[in-house]
């Protein structure tokens, strides 16, 4: 399908949301992603396509990419994205991915590192819109206090008491004790654990959870390659 850029919106000093109108009806589940192709001129050896989570919720009827723009050594792809004007088109795949919430009655601990918040933004915005917020404890770690989507997430938390959010700024890091505390808060048997962020972070937390006795079937991961931390 083709997506037409509607607008770019600065979320923090280095994170932008790109909003697109699809040229055909598209359905997706909150947490899914799309592969995007840009005609790049000039290109680099890092490729002309990328995967991005749809940070919009389905009820919003637009496709949103929310991404960090590197201050140094950014790719031609990201530069091409930034140079898009309203009305420009990009090529996109159908939505795909399993990082979705399908057990609404269960408890969920969401672990997020930095821009890894994008699938949770879609999941939480849709749950709030449907007024069907599962029991969720979100642990959201970031390198500074510019948490992407913070005001919106805080508003959702205020309106939906089954959601709680703990923000951690570096050098604070999410520890096993934080995850255990979040689990207790849910007051649900055998919750699901979702982990989203840079690959090393996601793999590290998955191993920590498995080592602490959580079964792999109860852990879902979504890792973003291409970011170092
Ligand atoms: C399922 C899935 C969902 C994803 N969802 C998102 C999302 O919602 N938001 C998002 O931002 N990303 C997401 N990603 C990651 C995304 O696809 C990109 O990999 C990521 O944004 C990095 O983009 P980039 O490669 O254009 O690098 P840039 O963002 O331009 O650069 C990132 C850093 O990589 C370093 N670097 C890496 N390779 C090189 C190289 N060859 N030469 C020089 N420097 C290099 C640079 O120093 C720079 O600091 C997702 C990935 C997957 C697989």
Image (tube, rainbow, N blue to C red):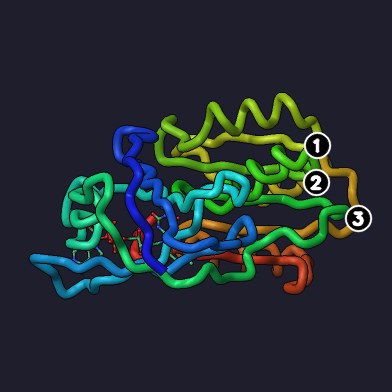
Residue 11 appears left or right of 164 = left
Check the image and report above or below for 95 versus 121. Answer: below
Tag in front: 3 or 1? 1
Residue 58: in sight, yes or no?
A: yes
Q: Residue 204 location, x and y as percent?
A: 55, 64
Q: Which mark is residue 162?
A: 1
Image label count? 3
Q: Residue 89 location, x and y as percent?
A: 29, 59
Disc 2 + disc 3, Cβ < 8 Å: no
Residue 224 appears left or right of 9 = right
Label 1: few (<14), some or many (≥20) within 10 Å?
some
Looking at the image, tell me whether mark 2 or mark 1 is earlier in sequence order. 2
The part of the image, by quadrant, that contains residue 139 is top right
Looking at the image, tell me whether mark 2 or mark 3 is earlier in sequence order. 2
Residue 20 appears left or right of 111 = left
For image coordinates 17% across by 56% down, the residue present is 73
| Rendered-image quadrant of the C terminus | bottom left
Q: Which mark is residue 134?
A: 2
Label 3: few (<14), some or many (≥20) within 10 Å?
few
The part of the image, by quadrant, that contains residue 164 is top right
For image coordinates 67% across by 61% down, the residue present is 100
Residue under circle 3? Answer: 189
Disc 2 + disc 1, Cβ < 8 Å: yes
**How far, Cα to Cα, is label 3 from label 1?**
15 Å
- Residue furthest to the left in view is 42
**How far, Cα to Cα, is label 2 from label 3?**
14 Å
Residue 221 appears left or right of 10 = right
């Amino acid at each position: 399908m083709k997506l037409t850029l509607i607008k770019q919106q600065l979320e923090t000093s280095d994170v932008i949301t790109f909003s697109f109108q699809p040229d055909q009806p598209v359905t997706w589940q909150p947490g899914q992603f799309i592969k995007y192709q840009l005609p790049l001129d000039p290109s680099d050896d890092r490729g002309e396509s990328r995967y991005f989570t749809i940070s919009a919720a389905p009820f919003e009827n637009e496709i949103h990419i929310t991404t960090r723009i590197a201050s140094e050594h950014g790719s031609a792809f990201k530069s091409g994205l930034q140079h898009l004007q309203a009305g420009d088109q990009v090529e996109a795949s159908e939505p795909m991915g399993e990082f979705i919430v399908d057990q609404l009655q269960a408890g969920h601990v969401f672990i997020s590192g930095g821009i890894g918040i994008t699938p949770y933004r879609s999941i939480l915005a849709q749950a709030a819109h449907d007024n069907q917020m599962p029991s969720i404890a979100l642990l959201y770690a970031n390198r500074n206090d510019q948490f992407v989507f913070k005001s919106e997430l805080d508003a959702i938390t205020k309106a939906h008491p089954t959601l709680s959010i703990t923000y951690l700024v570096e050098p604070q890091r999410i520890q096993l004790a934080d995850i255990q505390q979040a689990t207790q808060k849910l007051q649900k048997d055998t919750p699901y654990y979702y982990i989203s962020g840079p690959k090393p972070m996601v793999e590290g937390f998955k191993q920590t959870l498995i080592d602490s006795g959580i079964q792999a079937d109860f852990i879902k991961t979504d890792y973003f390659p291409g970011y170092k931390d």
